[in-house]
Amino acid sequence: MARYTGPVCRLCRRQGEKLYLKGDRCYTQKCSFEKRPHPPGPRSTRRRKISDRGLQLREKQRARATYGLLERQFVRYYNEAVRQPGVSGANLVRILESRLDNVVYRTGFANSRNQARQMVRHGLIALNGKKADIPSIMLREGDAVAFTERGQRSELFAILKEGVASKTIPDWLNLDVSAMSANVGAPPLVARGETHNFNENVIIEYYSR
């Protein structure tokens, strides 16, 4: 599946807030958003009022940038969320949070979703004891995530193992620090501010038109 390969700091500047797409770097003074918090491109002195449609678009773009998805894949997740029973917005967040690369990031095995995606692609992550190299695999309750033998031999494994204990893990994940493994104990939570920084209901309204 294709992905965005441009400068991710540009996405934060366009949204006008930090999306923490570079992991630990975003918490330091090296963060580009700290140096240039204004939108990319020529700076305009005109004030433009954003329409309701524009606000909905901004929420959608924020969600896409946060999870590193392109439009075609994001629309597919929206269609799946609408088909499922229950609240469509909550369904969309659960689908996004259930991706393998996101779970690897949430467990603290990676400093960012981009890094988690690369680790999966390189065969460093195992799902239920077998190597999984597709970042978009959907995890279910009871699924276990760990490092493959190749991943355990990598230098990155030793670096991550030192800092994984200090990471904040969501309640729906169970982490075994000593074994560097985790399992999905419950469906992902959808509380805004705890798991995501966008309004999922606005995104549903955007695509519903």
Image (cartoon, rainbow, N blue to C red):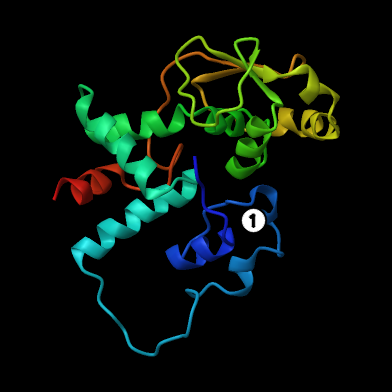
Name the spot of residue 11 as percent of width and height, x first.
50, 61
Q: Nearer the viewer, residue 65 or 201?
A: 65
Residue at 21%, 62% in the rendered image: 53
Q: Does 189 appear above or below 207?
A: above
Q: Is residue 177 left or right of residue 80?
A: right
Name the spot of residue 114 as percent of width and height, x first.
60, 44
Work out which residue is located at the far bottom of the displayed protein and give it.
Answer: 45
Q: Nearer the viewer, residue 67 or 184?
A: 67
Tell me the kind of residue under disc 1: Cys
Q: Does 180 appear above or below 202?
A: above
Q: Is residue 190 visible?
A: no
Q: Is residue 39 left or right of residue 23?
A: left
Q: Is residue 2 visible?
A: yes
Residue at label 1? 26
Residue at 27%, 47% in the rendered image: 203
Name the secondary structure under disc 1.
helix
Q: Quadrant of residue 165?
A: top right
Q: Nearer the viewer, residue 84 or 189?
A: 84
Q: Is residue 79 left or right of residue 71?
A: left
**Total numbered circles:** 1
Name the spot of residue 52 as percent of width and height, x first.
19, 63
Residue at 13%, 51% in the rendered image: 209
Q: Is residue 80 left or right of residue 157?
A: left
